[in-house]
Amino acid sequence: RAAAPLSQLRLGLLAGHPGDADGAPLPEALSACFGQLVHLLARGGGQAVLPEGSPLLRDATFLETTLAWGERPRATTRYGERCVGPGLHVMEAHDASGKRPMSWVETTVGLCGAGLHAVVAWRPAVCGAVTGHPMVPVLSVQLDDAGVAADVLLPAARPHEWLQVLLGQLAAVAGGELTPIALRSGNVDFQIPRGGAVSL
């Protein structure tokens, strides 16, 4: 391992999935926190990669924090392909028909195949524990009042602290001091998409 600023990390961001239960939207303060994280990475020469279809790409708070006024998000890289240049990237993440989003596991595999250092993942508490990847750390994020175990528990009453809490846990993972719950518990999966997507 070599010392480097956190802002130079290449991170994947999963904030829910199109198939997640209705009625469990992404908390607005978490959208803002993820937007601040992307902004930090972009300024520091790092990368943030979201899958096409991510709820963040339809979230006004996130978009206001990360994109130029009036800019529309679009895919900037193919599934599993390494991104070129710092900043926010969007990975293609639909099946061969281009109509159906890939599953959570397929999406995670595509992000990890893009050469990321880690993935930060939130899902509604009703979806249970986040499934990770066998080779790339996937940090699960939850609010501390959600009643679900997670690598990063954000204090629900103090959203102004969330980015620092998240950065602290990212530093622990990047430094080898913390192994995410999904890896420790064996809650990991790997699935290569069929039909039209690249083979990893």
Image (cartoon, grey):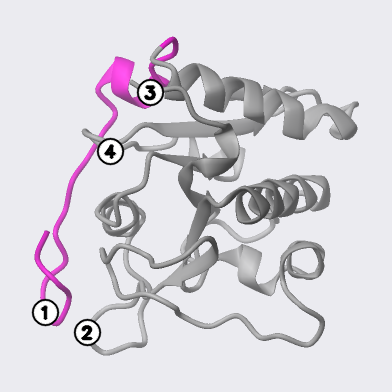
Residue plotted at (24% across, 22% down): 186
Q: Secondary structure at mark 1?
A: loop
Q: Nearer the viewer, mark 1 or mark 3?
A: 3
Q: Secondary structure at mark 2?
A: loop
- CA distance for labels 2 and 3: 39 Å
Q: Secondary structure at mark 4?
A: loop
Q: Tell me the quadrant of the picture where the C terminus can be found.
A: bottom left
- Three-letter code, disc 3: Ala
The spot of residue 130 in percent (x, y) is 43, 36
Q: Tell me the quadrant of the picture where the N terminus can be found.
A: top left
Residue 73, numbered label = none
- For label 1, the residue is 195
- Three-letter code, disc 1: Gly
Say which label, 2 or 3, has the lower sequence index: 3
Label 2 packing within 10 angstroms: few (<14), some (14-19), many (20+): some
Residue plotted at (36% across, 72% down): 93
- For label 2, the residue is 96
The spot of residue 155 in percent (x, y) is 80, 23
- CA distance for labels 1 and 4: 22 Å
- For label 3, the residue is 2
What residue occupies the far top of the structure in this picture?
Answer: 177
